[in-house]
Image: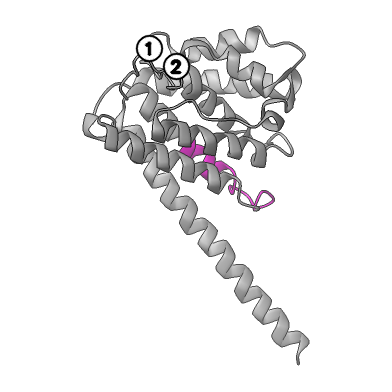
Amino acid sequence: MSTPSSSTPSSAGFSDTQVQLSSTLRALAARLPESLTVRELMQACGEQGLLLFCCILTFPFLLPVSIPGVSTVFGALIVLIGVGVTFNRMPWLPRKLLEKPLTRASLGPALDKGADVFSKYVDRLSKPRLLALTHGSSTNRFNGFMLFAAGLLLMAPFGFVPFSNTLPALAALFFAIGILQRDGYFILMGHGMTLGTVVYFTALIYGAIQGGRGLASLIGG
């Protein structure tokens, strides 16, 4: 994505990564206070900015046990970041979301796990390629819209169902990495995971409707 001019302070200012993502995550995990807000976490992300912050937002949903009660909040933040990427502007973030409290005990393991995954796979495998999927204003807007869509899917009220948070979180993670690293392969994986999420949610809704009809027929005799 093109770097905005310094004369437009409202621009998001996304820049190419100069430091390995795993190194940034480990440094962030090491200096986490006992408690912090979403605003403080976002400020701590450093030069890799909103897209790295978006990656961090997905980590709790990739663990066997997610942090309770944050899928709506984190999903909403990913939605707003997707809007920012789409319009190449720093998104407006509600004070209520920015002041959401987080603890080192809950966030630290997610950051450490994310750093391990990034070190083994992302830093080693990701690089600028399939640039047709990552360059150009129209392409950036479309990728931002898909990140927006992944955030919406993460907010869907299926948190009690296995993989209902994991699938859209992976989609958002792949899109964020693809945009940040200019890697078209990750963009393609993001599209695939988004499609898989839509199919999975459609099956859940269809199953619930059929189950409701079956229960109604039993009750109705």
Furthest residue to the front?
7
Element under disc 1: loop
The C terminus: image quadrant: bottom right
Residue 20 vertical position relative to residue 153 in the rendered view, above or below:
above
Mark 1 crowd level (few <14, some 14–19, many ≥20, 10 Å Cα): few
Q: Is residue 7 above or below residue 93?
A: above
Q: Amino acid at mark 2?
A: Pro
Q: Quadrant of residue 67?
A: top right
Task: Kindly state the secondary structure of the residue where label 2 is placed.
Answer: loop
Residue at horizontal 59 percent and vertical 14 percent from the top? 43
- Where is residue 211? Give x, y as percent: 65, 74
Question: Label 1 sits on what residue type?
Answer: Ser
Q: Quadrant of the N terminus?
A: top left
- In percent of the image, x 22 and y 33: which residue is there? 132
Q: Residue at x 38, y 12 (%)?
A: 6
Mark 1 lies on residue: 6
- The location of residue 123, given as percent across then percent down, is 40, 17
Determine the CA span between mark 2 and mark 1: 6 Å
- The residue lying at 35 percent from left, 19 percent from top is 4
Write down the residue under mark 2.
9
Q: Which residues are magenta?
A: 158-172
Query: Quick check: 69 left or right of 10?
Result: right
